[in-house]
Amino acid sequence: MSTDGKTPPPTVWPTLAADDARGLMAFLTDVLGFVEVVAYTDDDGVVQHAELAWPAGGGLMMGQRRPGTDDRATPSGTFSAYVVHPDAAEIDALAARVREDGRGDVVREPYDTDYGSHDTAIRDPEGNTWQFGTYPGAPRP
């Protein structure tokens, strides 16, 4: 484990393979708020591996779908994730940004759950589903 103060502590990082990695990365950063940390490309500019951090913690690892990589990541369009954002107003703003941007779709408008979360669900340009909400999970024992 790194102790340099810059490398994040161990967390869960889901992975997916995109048909258009650069296009999906632009949507995830410009519209949803992820931050591109690194993108390694081959000589042709194809994204082999990228890491997008979520400002509240964790993130996503992804790359371009290409021959020989189908078994290494969830195929684009079949991925689903729940992403925690502590600010309910930002959940509403995120849904508004998706509607205004037009590359993705709001699958479910912002709503309040019976367990106290404020959520919205969106579909990105490749068909992946993202649920954003304020519920951080139950306290650990």
Image (tube, rainbow, N blue to C red):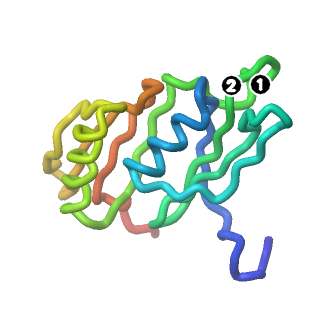
Q: How crowded is the residue under tag 2: few (<14 C-alpha within 10 Å), some, or many (20+)? A: many
In three-dimensional space, the C-alpha distance between marks 2 and 1, rounded to whole angstroms, equals 7 Å
Q: Which amino acid, by three-letter code, is at mark 2?
A: Arg
Looking at this rendering, what residue extends furthest in the top direction? 67
On the rendered structure, is 131 left or right of 19?
left
* Residue located 53% across and 35% down the image: 23
* Residue located 23% across and 38% down the image: 99
* Residue located 30% across and 39% down the image: 101
Instruction: Provide residue 78's location: percent of width, then percent of height.
Output: 50, 24
On the rendered structure, is 8 left or right of 97?
right
On the rendered structure, is 133 left or right of 10?
left
Q: Which amino acid, by three-letter code, is at mark 1?
A: Thr
In the rendered view, tell whether residue 109 sits above or below residue 90: above
Q: Nearer the viewer, residue 73 or 52?
A: 52
Residue under label 1: 69
Secondary element at image label 2: loop
Mark 2 vs mark 1, foreground winner is: 2
In the rendered view, tell whether residue 118 sits above or below residue 6: above
Numbered disc total: 2
Residue under label 2: 65
Q: Quadrant of the N terminus?
A: bottom right
In the rendered view, tell whether residue 97 sits above or below residue 140: above
Q: How crowded is the residue under tag 1: few (<14 C-alpha within 10 Å), some, or many (20+)? A: few
Whether tag 2 and tag 1 are in contact, CB under 8 A, the answer is: yes
Instruction: Provide residue 98's location: percent of width, then percent of height.
Output: 29, 41
Instruction: Provide residue 62's location: percent of width, then percent of height.
Output: 64, 40
